[in-house]
Image (cartoon, rainbow, N blue to C red):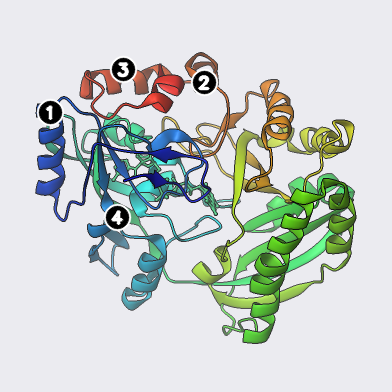
Amino acid sequence: MEWSNWAGNQLMDPVRVVKPRSVDEIAGAVKQAAADGLRVKAIGSGHSFTAIGLTNGVLLDMSAYNGLVSADPTTGLVTAQAGLPLHRLNALLPEHGLGLTNMGDVDVQTVSGAVSTGTHGTGRDSAGFAAQIAGLELVLADGSVVMCSATERPELFAAARVGLGALGVISTVTFQAEKAFVLEADERPMPLDDVLDGFFDLVAANEHFEFYWFPHTDIALTKRNNRTDAEVKPLSKAKAFIDDELLSNGVFELTCRLGRRMPTVIPRINKVAARALTARTYIDAAPKVFTSPRRVRFCEMEYAVPREALPDLFRELRSLPDRHGLKVSFPVEVRVAPADDATLSTAFGRDTAYIAVHMFKGSAYDPYFRAVEKLYDAVGGRPHWGKLHTLEAEQLRARYPRFDEFVALRDSLDPERRFGNAYLERVLG
Ligand SMILES: Cc1cc2nc3c(=O)[nH]c(=O)nc-3n(C[C@H](O)[C@H](O)[C@H](O)COP(=O)(O)OP(=O)(O)OC[C@H]3O[C@@H](n4cnc5c(N)ncnc54)[C@H](O)[C@@H]3O)c2cc1C
């Protein structure tokens, strides 16, 4: 069976695929792989752009291990099986009066896949998934099943919250959720200069601030999401269809295709698109505001940089496509997160800003991504583990203060590299 990720840039052909339905079946599959001398890799929804999920051994397809184990409205603790997709978790939690504190742009990832690469959204006070986890259950390389939390095997808990699939197979994730809440979304275009000049104020004034800059223009679309007690007032079906389906997906796909065939038209298309941006506000359940459908396929690179470096770095980045003669149709996305304490979290120990660059599927992304990536060296940028980058273990060691602790833990838990693959060899050594 040939497997491909969502973006279509990673392929694998494992020796066999196992679809576990219980923790015993996960442990059995790991032990059998060891007996056969094969490596093992669990896979989620295939939404990573890097080769992090590839194996030439046994592929554990987690999609059948997908239940909600428990949700406690009093404590907010929610335990989900590894293969539960976030959109189903988001649909189930309101029945218990609960919701996740923060999430990324899309909700198609599995809980274990999202956790494993350090998936995040944007938040002034609330961080990525790594900071929302209260406990994990893992199957280790010897087939044993262990729990970890802040009080139980805390060293494993610190590492496995962004575990890169390198420490074991996650069987369940326990989130610290909270009472379901509603967000007021305020989206409006602004001159990019104003956004950069006022960046820290915009972040400070909003619970969830982000912006998208349209390359080859001076315009950014800003998004401010804040909690409210007001009544839900969603976008009308027609407006949601026009904005989120037609413009963000249907028309965007067509203009991306045109731009891929005739790159010289891209700056003009972006100028028209940026001028067409209008303001909108709506109020809806948090998961509906945090996430939106993404049907146009692309490749992506995202780096985490120290928050204070963002405005100056972005001023350099904005001139880069034109300086290098690159035509870029996709907006550049900027988000933030507070410092967290998961060993290999991109926000470990520092307030962070994220910069994500994208290229339409089938367009050469290398020249653009490599040019942008160079900007991050000077500020110790940390790449998203699931998004394209070229860094290797030695460079990453210098960017993560506790890198060696992660590596040592991996050495002790998986000395034979049962969960290894080429990507992990590159980034962990
Ligand atoms: C359209 C799109 C939008 C995105 N938006 C965001 C965003 O807003 N923010 C963000 O941070 N990222 C974002 N991403 C990246 C995405 O969230 C991550 O790559 C995430 O890891 C994908 O989850 P998945 O379930 O598809 O996992 P996969 O890509 O299938 O797997 C990711 C890694 O997790 C490991 N893994 C999966 N399950 C287990 C398990 N049970 N035990 C151990 N290891 C396991 C895999 O082996 C692999 O190493 C986006 C990606 C796409 C394509």
Residue that extends furthest to the top in the rendered view of this protein: 394
Mark closer to the chain start, 1 or 2: 1
Residue occupying the point 87% across, 36% down? 319
As measured in the structure, the alpha-carbon distance from the residue carrying label 1 to the one carrying label 3 is 26 Å
Kindly tell me whether mark 4's CB lies below 8 Å from ligand 1: yes
Per the rendering, the mark at residue 36 is 1
Q: Residues within 10 Å of mark 4 (few under 14, many from 20)?
A: many
Q: Residues within 10 Å of mark 1 (few under 14, many from 20)?
A: few
Proximity of marks 2 and 4: CB atoms separated by less than 8 Å: no
Mark closer to the chain start, 3 or 2: 2
Proximity of marks 1 and 3: CB atoms separated by less than 8 Å: no
The residue at which mark 3 appears reads as: 408
Residue occupying the point 85% across, 68% down? 276
Residue occupying the point 74% across, 53% down? 212
Looking at the picture, how far across and down is residue 136, in whole percent? 26, 45
Nearest-to-viewer mark from 4 and 3 = 4
The residue at which mark 2 appears reads as: 396
Res. 175 in view: yes
Mark closer to the chain start, 4 or 3: 4
Q: Is residue 73 left or right of residue 302?
A: left
Circle 3: element type: helix
Q: Is residue 69 left or right of residue 118?
A: left
Q: Is residue 346 left or right of residue 21?
A: right
As measured in the structure, the alpha-carbon distance from the residue carrying label 4 to the one carrying label 3 is 28 Å
> Is residue 280 shown above or below 375?
below
What amino acid type is highlighted by mark number 2? Leu
Proximity of marks 1 and 2: CB atoms separated by less than 8 Å: no
The residue at which mark 4 appears reads as: 83
Circle 4: element type: loop
Q: Residues within 10 Å of mark 3 (few under 14, many from 20)?
A: few
